[in-house]
Image (tube, rainbow, N blue to C red):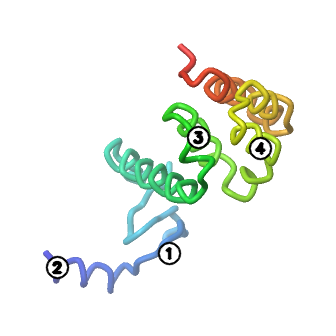
Amino acid sequence: MNKLIEQLKLHEGSRTHAYDCPAGYITIGVGRNIDPNGGLGLSENEINYLLKNDIERCYRELDRFSWFMDLDQVRQEALVNMLFNIGLPRLLSFKKMIASLMAKEYSQAAEEIINSLYARQVGNRANELAYMIERGEYLK
């Protein structure tokens, strides 16, 4: 199988980003046609594999901050959700929210989410994350 993998990578190429193949289809990796018009797409297992990798990356990005490590699991997961959505630089721009989290002022941290441009952009997602930050539990 290793020889076949080498050969396919040689013939197809290996790309880290989506691209249009010579036939014009959206393609990823080693010749995986994911185009909505006749492509294979991704299986649920592949989607979950990618998602788990992205979640692990988010945790690695946040684990270096002591204020994050001091939070309970639900509040950590709310921040991972937010990071997944907006990236680390934008998450770190929520300075008042982070200061409130460090002070364990969870209602204030939740307010910082609700009163942000982010909340106006993502709507109910922000409400749910603010609830998680404030209460330390998932919205039922």
Q: Do labels 3 and 2 touch, CB within 8 Å?
A: no
Looking at the image, residue 87 lies above or below residue 139: below
Residue that label 3 marks: 81
Please name the residue that numbered disc 2 is placed on: 2
Dot 3 and dot 4 residues touching (CB under 8 Å): no
Closer to the camera: disc 3 or disc 4?
A: 4
**Number of the front mark, 1 or 3:** 3
- The residue where tag 1 is placed is 22
User: Is label 2 in contact with label 4 (beta carbons under 8 Å)?
Assistant: no
Q: Which of 140 and 45 is in front in this view?
A: 140
Name the front one of labels 3 and 2. Answer: 3
Residue at 38%, 63% (x, y): give it.
32
Q: What element carries label 3?
A: helix
x and y, in percent, of residue 133 in the image: 65, 29
**Separation of marks 2 and 4 at Cα, in angstroms:** 51 Å
Residue furthest top in the image: 140
Measure the C-alpha gap from mark 1 to mark 3: 36 Å
Residue type (three-letter) at the residue carrying disc 4? Ala
Give, as a three-letter code, the residue at label 1. Pro
| Depicted 116 relative to depicted 30: above or below | above
How far apart are the two marked residues, 4 and 1, measured between alpha carbons?
51 Å
Measure the C-alpha gap from mark 1 to mark 2.
Answer: 26 Å
Q: Which mark is residue 99?
A: 4
For numbered disc 2, what is the local secondary structure? helix
Mark 3 and mark 4 lie on one chain; the one further toward the N terminus is 3
Kind of residue indicated by mark 2: Asn
Whole-percent x, y for residue 99 in the image = 77, 43
Residue placed most toward the observer, 9 or 121: 121
